[in-house]
Amino acid sequence: MEENLKNQLDQISNSIDSKIEKSNNDVANTIEVKASEIVKSEVTEMSNKLNERFDAFEVANKKQFNANKKMTFKGALSEAIENGAIEGLTKGNSRSARFEIKADMTVGADFTGEVIPADRVAGYKFDPTRPVHIRQLLAQGSTQSDVVRFVKESGYSNGAAAHSEGVTLGQSDFDMTAADANVRKIGTYFRISEEMLADTPQLTSYLSARAPEKLLEVEDTQILSGSGVAPQLSGIITDSTAFAAGDLADSVDNANEFDVIVASLNQLAIANYNADTILLNPTDFHKILLLKDTTNNYIKDQVYGGLQPVFMGVKVVLNTAIAAGSFLIGNFGVGTQLWVREGVNVEFFREDGTNVRDGFVTVRVSERVALTNYLPNAFVKGTFAAAIADLETP
């Protein structure tokens, strides 16, 4: 009986343990489900709040973007109409339409033409003209004729010699030749409307100053290189003596441009002329300044002096009227002369062609001059390339 009682107690104990274990498992499952539901609920709530904040942030940014957006009056008007601002009016539901346009007005978008006047600088800007014209190097005279005639020696036979007492002296002969230099006209003209002349500030002063300078540039070319065939002047280079190395030929090692100038001065000295001007293109002058001796010292330091360029005591004049690579050296004071029949003048005419009908004014710029090249041997001309070849040692 005790054994049976023991077995029954064991069964009762096992049943109680089983129920307790089952109860514990049910409680754990219930707690897990409850916890999961609570977590899920909290996550959902946090997600909803986060989405609401993002939506609010996006709306705020959009409003700020629209507030900062630059819009022209035309653009704002178009946008308002597209958004239905006058829809009631067009459908007949309203007799009027009113809407507010907030637009940024800018110069580029809303101004057409010169709404804001510019500050204008007075006068006219242009590149400078030649600082020195060739006429400034020459003796000048005036004439009342259309021809300037001069007489020059064309030949001389010198019979002078030492003689003993009672011996007949030798005879000398010379030839004289009359030479003519015709007066030539150099000029140009402009046709300008009356309105342009009257309404453009300082145009008359500009033409009066600028046009003569341009005419003098043409005069420079005529004085130097005129062919002598009508209607051109006979230029100094045309009539002058060509470079001749003489005893210096084939005698200079590593000959350069400065050697050519020295040889030219020697050629003039042999003809009893003292040069007063060396005429060079600016490119050749600055090339000479860059020449160096065998010790890498600039040659100019030995021959160049003063603010005014001077080589070997002779004035150097820079002028673009002489071509780069060429030179002209001589006594400009005695070798030639410019004669002026009519000086440079600027004239305005209404009575020219159809000016009266068309409303134009003709502006004429002109001069009449002649050039007398008295002494061709007072000048030496040439090109540096050919002269260097003549001087260079074989």
Image (cartoon, rainbow, N blue to C red):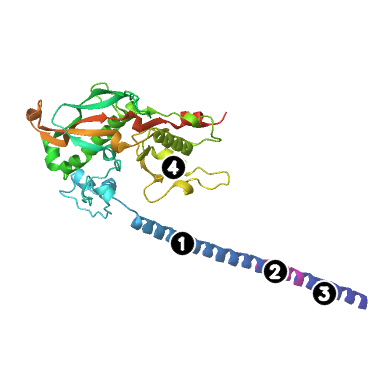
In the figure, is residue 357 to the left or right of 101?
A: left
Where's residue 342, x and y in %?
15, 33
Alpha carbon distance from label 1 to label 4? 81 Å
Q: Is residue 7 above or below residue 388?
A: below
Q: Is residue 48 above or below residue 150?
A: below
Alpha carbon distance from label 3 to label 1? 58 Å
Where's residue 366, x and y in %?
18, 32
Task: Choose the circle earlier in sequence order: 3 or 4.
Answer: 3
- Give the structural element (helix, strand or loop) at label 1: helix
The amino acid marked with disc number 3 is Ser
Question: Which label sits on residue 88?
Answer: none
CB of mark 2 within 8 Å of CB of mark 3?
no
- Give the structural element (helix, strand or loop) at label 2: helix
- Give the structural element (helix, strand or loop) at label 3: helix
Task: Choose the circle earlier in sequence order: 1 or 4.
Answer: 1
Q: Crowding near pointer 2: few (<14 within 10 Å), some, many (20+)?
A: few
Q: Is residue 19 visible?
A: yes
Q: Crowding near pointer 4: few (<14 within 10 Å), some, many (20+)?
A: few
Q: Residue at 20%, 53% (x, y): give it.
A: 98
Q: Pointer 3: what residue?
A: 13
Q: Is residue 66 above or below residue 150?
A: below
Magenta stretch, residue numbers = 20-30
Task: Choose the circle earlier in sequence order: 3 or 1.
Answer: 3
Q: Residue at 50%, 42% (x, y): give it.
A: 291
The amino acid marked with disc number 2 is Ala
Asked whether residue 274 is drawn in magenta, I would say no
Alpha carbon distance from label 2 to label 3? 22 Å
